Protein backbone atom coordinates (compact mmCIF):
# COMPACT_ATOMS: atom_id res chain seq x y z
CA UNK A 1 0.00 0.00 0.00
CA UNK A 2 2.96 2.31 0.56
CA UNK A 3 4.21 2.17 -3.01
CA UNK A 4 3.00 4.72 -5.56
CA UNK A 5 -0.44 4.09 -6.96
CA UNK A 6 -3.48 6.26 -7.59
CA UNK A 7 -4.13 7.06 -3.90
CA UNK A 8 -0.52 7.86 -3.10
CA UNK A 9 -0.13 10.09 -6.15
CA UNK A 10 -3.42 11.92 -5.58
CA UNK A 11 -2.76 12.46 -1.86
CA UNK A 12 0.78 13.70 -2.45
CA UNK A 13 -0.45 16.13 -5.12
CA UNK A 14 -3.36 17.26 -2.93
CA UNK A 15 -1.07 17.81 0.06
CA UNK A 16 1.23 19.90 -2.12
CA UNK A 17 -1.54 21.90 -3.77
CA UNK A 18 -4.06 22.39 -0.95
CA UNK A 19 -2.15 21.56 2.24
CA UNK A 20 -2.47 18.86 4.86
CA UNK A 21 -5.60 20.00 6.70
CA UNK A 22 -7.78 20.61 3.61
CA UNK A 23 -6.82 17.12 2.39
CA UNK A 24 -8.09 15.39 5.57
CA UNK A 25 -11.52 14.48 4.12
CA UNK A 26 -9.68 12.86 1.19
CA UNK A 27 -7.44 10.92 3.60
CA UNK A 28 -10.37 9.72 5.70
CA UNK A 29 -12.33 8.77 2.58
CA UNK A 30 -9.45 6.64 1.33
CA UNK A 31 -9.11 4.92 4.71
CA UNK A 32 -12.84 4.13 4.93
CA UNK A 33 -13.14 3.21 1.25
CA UNK A 34 -10.17 0.86 1.37
CA UNK A 35 -11.61 -0.80 4.48
CA UNK A 36 -14.99 -1.27 2.79
CA UNK A 37 -13.40 -2.67 -0.37
CA UNK A 38 -11.20 -5.07 1.61
CA UNK A 39 -14.13 -6.14 3.78
CA UNK A 40 -16.36 -6.82 0.79
CA UNK A 41 -13.56 -8.81 -0.79
CA UNK A 42 -13.42 -10.91 2.38
CA UNK A 43 -17.17 -11.51 2.03
CA UNK A 44 -16.68 -12.94 -1.45
CA UNK A 45 -17.20 -10.08 -3.91
CA UNK A 46 -13.70 -10.77 -5.21
CA UNK A 47 -14.78 -14.25 -6.27
CA UNK A 48 -17.68 -12.70 -8.18
CA UNK A 49 -15.31 -10.35 -10.02
CA UNK A 50 -12.94 -13.15 -10.94
CA UNK A 51 -15.75 -15.44 -12.10
CA UNK A 52 -17.34 -12.78 -14.33
CA UNK A 53 -14.79 -11.64 -16.93
CA UNK A 54 -17.19 -9.02 -18.34
CA UNK A 55 -17.65 -7.45 -14.91
CA UNK A 56 -13.91 -7.45 -14.32
CA UNK A 57 -13.29 -5.83 -17.73
CA UNK A 58 -15.95 -3.20 -17.02
CA UNK A 59 -14.27 -2.38 -13.70
CA UNK A 60 -10.89 -2.09 -15.43
CA UNK A 61 -12.27 0.19 -18.15
CA UNK A 62 -14.04 2.42 -15.63
CA UNK A 63 -10.94 2.59 -13.45
CA UNK A 64 -8.66 3.46 -16.36
CA UNK A 65 -11.03 6.12 -17.70
CA UNK A 66 -11.42 7.82 -14.33
CA UNK A 67 -7.70 7.69 -13.54
CA UNK A 68 -6.81 9.06 -16.99
CA UNK A 69 -9.33 11.88 -16.50
CA UNK A 70 -7.70 12.78 -13.18
CA UNK A 71 -4.26 12.60 -14.79
CA UNK A 72 -5.41 14.98 -17.51
CA UNK A 73 -6.80 17.43 -14.93
CA UNK A 74 -3.55 17.29 -12.98
CA UNK A 75 -1.52 17.76 -16.18
CA UNK A 76 -3.52 20.89 -16.96
CA UNK A 77 -3.46 22.23 -13.40
CA UNK A 78 -1.15 24.99 -14.60
CA UNK A 79 0.45 27.49 -12.29
CA UNK A 80 1.61 27.02 -8.74
CA UNK A 81 -1.08 26.70 -6.10
CA UNK A 82 -2.23 29.95 -4.55
CA UNK A 83 -3.83 30.06 -1.12
CA UNK A 84 -6.29 32.69 -2.39
CA UNK A 85 -7.21 30.74 -5.50
CA UNK A 86 -10.44 28.77 -5.55
CA UNK A 87 -9.51 26.80 -8.66
CA UNK A 88 -9.77 23.14 -7.88
CA UNK A 89 -10.24 21.46 -4.54
CA UNK A 90 -9.23 18.27 -2.77
CA UNK A 91 -11.40 15.18 -3.04
CA UNK A 92 -14.35 15.13 -0.67
CA UNK A 93 -14.77 12.26 1.78
CA UNK A 94 -17.42 10.61 -0.41
CA UNK A 95 -15.42 11.03 -3.63
CA UNK A 96 -12.43 9.34 -2.00
CA UNK A 97 -14.59 6.49 -0.64
CA UNK A 98 -16.17 5.91 -4.04
CA UNK A 99 -12.83 6.08 -5.85
CA UNK A 100 -11.74 2.93 -4.01
CA UNK A 101 -14.40 0.97 -5.89
CA UNK A 102 -12.49 1.47 -9.12
CA UNK A 103 -8.97 1.72 -7.72
CA UNK A 104 -7.24 -1.25 -9.35
CA UNK A 105 -4.37 -1.35 -6.88
CA UNK A 106 -6.70 -1.70 -3.89
CA UNK A 107 -8.67 -4.45 -5.60
CA UNK A 108 -5.48 -6.35 -6.48
CA UNK A 109 -4.15 -6.15 -2.93
CA UNK A 110 -7.53 -6.97 -1.36
CA UNK A 111 -8.02 -9.98 -3.65
CA UNK A 112 -4.56 -11.28 -2.79
CA UNK A 113 -5.17 -10.81 0.94
CA UNK A 114 -8.60 -12.46 0.77
CA UNK A 115 -7.03 -15.50 -0.88
CA UNK A 116 -5.12 -16.11 2.35
CA UNK A 117 -7.96 -16.78 4.78
CA UNK A 118 -7.42 -16.62 8.50
CA UNK A 119 -7.52 -19.90 10.35
CA UNK A 120 -11.08 -20.89 11.30
CA UNK A 121 -12.56 -17.48 10.45
CA UNK A 122 -16.00 -17.22 8.92
CA UNK A 123 -16.74 -14.75 6.12
CA UNK A 124 -17.90 -11.96 8.45
CA UNK A 125 -14.88 -12.28 10.73
CA UNK A 126 -12.58 -12.45 7.71
CA UNK A 127 -14.22 -9.35 6.23
CA UNK A 128 -13.81 -7.50 9.53
CA UNK A 129 -10.17 -8.58 9.82
CA UNK A 130 -9.36 -7.41 6.29
CA UNK A 131 -11.27 -4.14 6.66
CA UNK A 132 -9.54 -3.21 9.92
CA UNK A 133 -6.09 -4.26 8.73
CA UNK A 134 -6.38 -2.37 5.44
CA UNK A 135 -7.86 0.75 7.03
CA UNK A 136 -5.32 0.82 9.85
CA UNK A 137 -2.32 0.40 7.58
CA UNK A 138 -3.68 2.78 4.99
CA UNK A 139 -4.24 5.55 7.53
CA UNK A 140 -0.49 5.78 8.14
CA UNK A 141 0.30 5.55 4.43
CA UNK A 142 -2.17 8.35 3.62
CA UNK A 143 -0.89 10.57 6.42
CA UNK A 144 2.72 10.07 5.32
CA UNK A 145 2.18 10.85 1.61
CA UNK A 146 -0.08 13.82 2.27
CA UNK A 147 2.47 15.24 4.73
CA UNK A 148 5.22 14.65 2.15
CA UNK A 149 3.22 16.58 -0.43
CA UNK A 150 2.52 19.40 2.03
CA UNK A 151 6.23 19.55 2.90
CA UNK A 152 7.04 19.95 -0.80
CA UNK A 153 4.63 22.87 -1.19
CA UNK A 154 7.23 25.51 -0.34
CA UNK A 155 9.50 24.15 -3.08
CA UNK A 156 6.66 24.30 -5.58
CA UNK A 157 5.69 27.93 -5.17
CA UNK A 158 7.22 28.89 -8.52
CA UNK A 159 4.98 28.18 -11.53
CA UNK A 160 7.68 26.19 -13.34
CA UNK A 161 8.37 23.97 -10.34
CA UNK A 162 4.66 23.30 -9.78
CA UNK A 163 4.13 22.52 -13.46
CA UNK A 164 6.96 19.95 -13.44
CA UNK A 165 5.64 18.36 -10.23
CA UNK A 166 2.03 18.27 -11.48
CA UNK A 167 3.06 16.73 -14.77
CA UNK A 168 5.24 14.14 -13.07
CA UNK A 169 2.27 13.18 -10.85
CA UNK A 170 -0.04 13.13 -13.92
CA UNK A 171 2.33 10.77 -15.74
CA UNK A 172 2.38 8.52 -12.67
CA UNK A 173 -1.41 8.42 -12.67
CA UNK A 174 -1.56 7.69 -16.39
CA UNK A 175 0.91 4.82 -16.00
CA UNK A 176 -1.16 3.38 -13.14
CA UNK A 177 -4.24 3.53 -15.43
CA UNK A 178 -2.40 1.51 -18.07
CA UNK A 179 -1.15 -1.02 -15.52
CA UNK A 180 -4.76 -1.98 -14.80
CA UNK A 181 -4.60 -4.20 -17.86
CA UNK A 182 -1.32 -5.95 -17.02
Image (cartoon, helix red, strand yellow):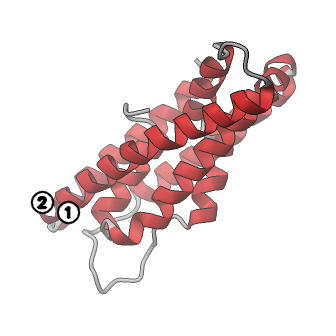
Residue farthest to the bottom, as pictured: 84
Q: Which mark is residue 175?
A: none
Query: Left of 36 or right of it: where is 21?
Result: left
Judging depth in this view, the residue of 123 and 44 nearest the camera is 123
Query: Left of 21 or right of it: where is 44?
Result: right
Q: Secondary structure at mark 2?
A: helix
Judging depth in this view, the residue of 20 and 116 nearest the camera is 116
What is the quadrant of residue 38 in the picture? top right
Q: Residue at x 24, y 61 (%)?
A: 150
Q: Residue at x 30, y 47 (%)?
A: 144
Judging by the rendered image, the residue that carries numbered circle 1 is 153
| Cα–Cα span, label 1 and label 2 | 5 Å
Q: Say if mark 1 contacts mark 2, CB within 8 Å.
A: yes
Q: Residue at x 57, y 34 (%)?
A: 106
Task: Look at the image and tell me whether residue 57 can be seen.
Answer: no
Q: How many marks?
A: 2
What is the quadrant of residue 75 in the picture? bottom left
Sort mark 2 into few (<14), some (14-19) or many (20+) by Cα contacts within 10 Å. Answer: few
Task: Look at the image and tell me whether residue 67 can be seen.
Answer: yes
Judging by the rendered image, the residue that carries numbered circle 2 is 155
Query: Left of 172 or right of it: where is 46?
Result: right
Percent x, y of residue 182? 58, 17
Percent x, y of residue 52? 87, 22
Sort mark 1 into few (<14), some (14-19) or many (20+) by Cα contacts within 10 Å. Answer: many
Give the quadrant of the N terminus.
top left
Q: Secondary structure at mark 1?
A: helix
Q: Residue at x 47, y 45 (%)?
A: 7
Percent x, y of residue 79? 28, 69
Residue farthest to the front, as pictured: 120
Query: Left of 141 or right of it: where is 48?
Result: right
Amino acid sequence: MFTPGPNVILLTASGARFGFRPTMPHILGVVVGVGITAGLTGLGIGTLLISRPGLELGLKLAASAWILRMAWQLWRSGAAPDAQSHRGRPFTFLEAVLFQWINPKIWAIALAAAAIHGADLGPVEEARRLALAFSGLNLFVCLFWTAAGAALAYLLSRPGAWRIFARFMAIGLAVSALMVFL
